[in-house]
Image (cartoon, helix red, strand yellow):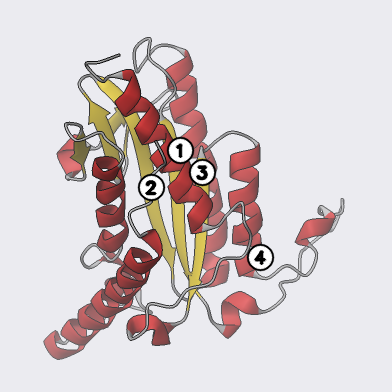
Amino acid sequence: MALDLANYQEHAKEAIMVFWGNREAALRNQVESGHVDAGTRGAVTAGKNLDGFIALMRNLVVANGLHHANVHVNKGLVVLPGFFRPTKQWDLLVVNGHRLVAAIEFKSQVGSFGNNYNNRTEEAIGTAHCLWTAYRDGALGNEPRPFLGWLMVVEDAPGSQAPVRNEEPHFPVFPEFRGASYLRRYDLLCQKLVREQLYSAAALLATPQSAVNTGSYTELSTLSGLGNFVTAFAGHIAAEAARTSPST
C-alpha cells in the first residue's frame, strides 16, 4: 500500500503561517505589557511556535495506519533515558504499547544567527549520540531502532544568506564550509546528521517573515527537504503498523 503523506505541503504552509503569527502575537503582547526581552527571545520562548508541524506528524501517524499509538507532546511524557545524562526531553514521541516508534525535535532560528548556530549544532549531535548509545545498551528494550527526526525552521533573511568567514589559525576547514552562509551551514548539518546515521531524517525550511501571510518556505537540498523527512517518517510509521497488525 502506498504511503499517505497527508498533503504535507499544504500543512507545512499552514504551520509556517502559525509559526510567524505566534511570534508576532508574542512580541505584540510583550510590548503592550511593557516586558520586552532583549532581541526576540521572548517570541521564541512564548508559546509553541512549531505546533503546526507537530499537527502534521500526528496526521502522518494516523494516515499510515498507526491509529492506536500514543503521540506525546506534553512535558512530563516526552522524557527518554540517556547514556551521558539521565534523561532528555524531546518535543514529540510516538509510542506504540511499550515500544518507542519515533522521537522528534523541532527547532527554530530567527535572527542572532552567529550566536545560536553552534549551540544548535552541538545540541543536535549530542542529543542523538546520547540516545543511540543508551539504545545500544538496552535502555529502550530489545526493540527495532526508532525513527529519530530533527526539523529546523530558519528565518530567510540577509543575515542568514550572507557568506560567513571562518577562523583558521592552525588548520583549514573543510571546503564545503568556505563562504557558506548560515542557511548553507544548517543545510550541511542536516545532510551530515543523516549520512552519519545520527538521525533517520533531518529537515531545514528557510522562510521569510513575510510568510506570515503566505506560508512560503524554501528547501535547500533534497536530503534536507521536508519531502524526504515526511516520506521517511511515514515509511517508518507504516512499517510499525504492519509489524503490529493483528493480521500479521
Badge 3: how crowded within 10 Å, few (<14), some, or many (20+)? many
Number of the label disc, if any, that sits on residue 184: 4
Please name the amino acid that badge 2 sits on: Glu
Element under label 4?
helix
Instruction: Name the residue: 55% across, 35% down.
Output: 198
Nearest the eye: 165 or 134: 134
Q: Residue furthest front?
A: 1
Instruction: Name the residue: 37% across, 83% down.
Output: 214
Q: Nearer the viewer, mark 2 or mark 3?
A: 3
The residue where tag 2 is placed is 105
The quarter of the displayed image where residue 85 is located: top left
Dots 2 and 1: beta carbons under 8 Å? yes
Q: Nearer the viewer, mark 4 or mark 1?
A: 4
**What is the spatial separation of the Cα atoms under label 2 and label 1, in whole angstroms?**
9 Å
First-in-chain label (2 vs 1): 2
**What is the spatial separation of the Cα atoms under label 4 and label 1, in whole angstroms?**
22 Å
Q: Compared with residue 22, is residue 166 higher up or lower down, i.e. above or below?
A: above
First-in-chain label (2 vs 3): 2
Report x, y in % for residue 19. 31, 71
Please name the amino acid that badge 3 sits on: Ala
Element under label 1?
helix
Dots 4 and 3: beta carbons under 8 Å? no
The residue where tag 3 is placed is 201
Which image quarter holds the C terminus? Answer: top left
The answer to whether 211 appears left or right of 220 in the picture is: left
Instruction: Name the residue: 48% across, 15% down.
Output: 136
Badge 2: how crowded within 10 Å, few (<14), some, or many (20+)? some
